[in-house]
Amino acid sequence: MKKDHRTNLEKFRIENVPTDQYIQAITAIPRPSHDLFPLVETYNKKGILLIERKNEPAKGMIWPIGGRQQRGYYLRDSLINLVKEECGLKIYDISCLCGEPEDLFWEKDSFGHGKGVHDVCVPYFARTRGNLKLDLNHENPLIITPKEFSNIKDDLHWYVQKYTEKALKIAFD
């Protein structure tokens, strides 16, 4: 009988890595990350959800839901968990928006070690179900329609601009 390879992941899951070990790791190697540009229908509006981040490295920026991949989870499973935690939404019809991950280099980091952070990000699109409820690390949800995007796109980080545009094409074409 063939063993399900997913059961082997349990041994890789770590709930809390001590802060000093985590800082040492993120200053030495890139962090695998994922972001979601989801289609939502809320506040009597349909569009791509972006939020304002309250933590570094993208503090104060308009950004998608997402972050680093959870250890011991496949990329999509980690994304599903993270989206549920950060905004309370369930996602489906998930599709990758890129051919290869994007490198994001940040001068700031969440711990103030001064060495910056290197993220290797995979952006996704998905449709959503549920009620939007942001956690404490995110605020000011924006539901971006194609018309609104044309008005704000030049003010967005290149990564957010590129993948919001791709997500809007999938959602509205």
Image (cartoon, rainbow, N blue to C red):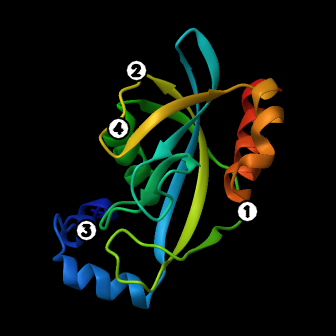
Image point (66%, 68%), residue name: 102
**Residue for badge 2:** 130
Report the amino acid beneath label 2. Answer: Gly
Q: Are marks 1 and 3 in contact (CB under 8 Å)?
A: no
Q: CA distance from mark 2 to mark 4?
A: 10 Å
Q: CA distance from mark 2 to mark 3?
A: 31 Å
Among the 4 quarters of the image, the one containing residue 38 = top right
**Residue for badge 4:** 84
Q: Are marks 4 and 3 in contact (CB under 8 Å)?
A: no
Q: Residues within 10 Å of mark 3 (few under 14, many from 20)?
A: few
Image point (51%, 39%), residue name: 51
Residue 167 x/y as whole percent: 71, 39
User: If you read the primary sequence from the N terminus, does the residue marked by circle 4 or circle 3 appear first?
Assistant: 3
User: If you read the primary sequence from the N terminus, does the residue marked by circle 1 or circle 4 appear first?
Assistant: 4
Q: Residues within 10 Å of mark 1 (few under 14, many from 20)?
A: few
Q: Secondary structure at mark 1?
A: loop
**Residue for badge 1:** 99
Which is more toward the observer, 26 or 1?
Answer: 26
The image quadrant where one finds the N terminus is bottom left
User: If you read the primary sequence from the N terminus, does the residue marked by circle 2 or circle 3 appear first?
Assistant: 3
Report the amino acid beneath label 1. Answer: Gly
Q: CA distance from mark 1 to mark 3?
A: 28 Å
User: If you read the primary sequence from the N terminus, does the residue marked by circle 1 or circle 3 appear first?
Assistant: 3
Q: Are marks 1 and 2 in contact (CB under 8 Å)?
A: no
Q: Residues within 10 Å of mark 4 (few under 14, many from 20)?
A: some
Residue 105 x/y as whole percent: 59, 75
Image point (41%, 84%), residue name: 114
| Residue at the limit of the structure toward the top, as seen here | 44
**Residue for badge 3:** 8
Report the amino acid beneath label 4. Answer: Lys
